[in-house]
Image: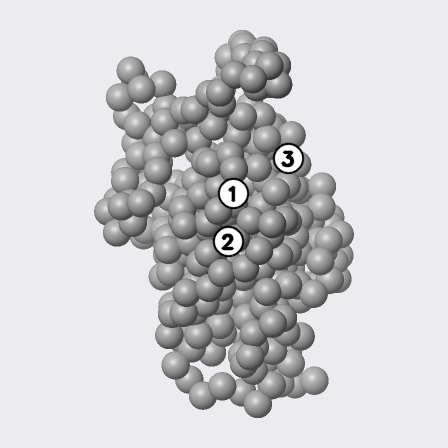
Amino acid sequence: MITPIGFTSDGAVLRGALYTPESARPAAGYPLVLLAQGLGTLHEWVRETAAVFNEAGIACIAADYRGFGVSDGEPRQQADAWRIVHDLRAAIDYVHTLDGIDTSRIGVWGTSFGGGPAMVTAAVDRRVKVLALQVPVASGSGLMKQLTTPEVLAGLRTALEADRVGIVSGQPLVRMIQTSIDPADQALASDEGTYSWMTEEAKATPHWVNQLTFQTIDRLMEFEPADYLPRFAPRPVLLIVEENDEINPEQYAIDALEKVEGPKKLVRLNGGNHYSVYREHFDKVSSEARDWFVTHLVEAEAAS
């Protein structure tokens, strides 16, 4: 069952959905997984993952990030990872007000850009018992180094610094098209993989806005979530990566996982790309995450 939800985070109302299983509710309530979606995407875009978890008796919650989709918040279309960490923690607060949820069994799942805030949220919030990540951003600076040349990156930093001064001086935020394969658009992501996946998903969510603020890049480059992952120990963490990921370099996340002391699992996929986790590898990655949560969130509680 899908139920619209709304809760506040730093004064802004965030809206999304609660996905509850059709199976009988346990006496203590359903375990729940908080879903953190990718950059510039909407909460509806993780509905298929929620459905897989629901089939295993796990409830899910997802909400549009502040400034995106049906959620409130300004500036619009600015993805600020640290702000999203606060939003995810506010979602956990909200979960504690719901009937039928076992708040002693909360997990977090994050994909792509959402994997970064998911790492930090899980590390700093002890209410999170289990973590699963797929193709996560583990290093904002590392991601930008992969996507650009040193010369382009240096010029980008200069432009971002000038933009910050302009904003303080009262100039409007500079905005960019998020994805396009037309070079004239100078989009943030001009690769075919990003464009084809996002525009396909957008067909079912016509309110999606293909735009990000220029300052989103600055916020991303200062975000190093891999530094937080070892703090999640000794709680269990699953990491799924695509080898040769053309968007998020997998080695940053793998290096962070190696420092985690506790239950952990690394799944390395090959023969695909960053967006394969939503396409040809979806059944594999969703079942791996489902089984991880069943083992450590559902069965572990039953055995205790």
Query: Residue 303: x percent and y percent?
Result: 65, 85
Viewer-proximal residue among 262 and 24: 24
Q: Which residue is mark 3?
A: 223
Viewer-proximal residue among 36 and 93: 93
Q: Which mark is residue 14?
A: 2
The kind of secondary structure element at disc 2 is strand
Q: CA distance from mark 1 to mark 2?
A: 8 Å
Residue 12 placement, left or right of 42: right
The mark that comes first in sequence, 1 or 2, is 2
Judged by depth in the image, the label closer to the viewer, 1 or 3, is: 1
The residue drawn where x is 49% and y is 74% is: 58
The kind of secondary structure element at disc 3 is loop
Q: Is residue 35 visible?
A: yes
Residue 98 placement, left or right of 224: left
Q: How many marks?
A: 3
Q: CA distance from mark 1 to mark 3?
A: 21 Å
Query: Residue 10: x percent and y percent?
Result: 63, 49
* Residue 280 drawn above or below residue 161: below
The residue drawn where x is 70% and y is 65% is: 127
Query: Residue 167: x percent and y percent?
Result: 57, 19
Instruction: Determine contact: label 1, label 2, CB under 8 Å.
Output: yes
Q: Which residue is mark 1?
A: 73
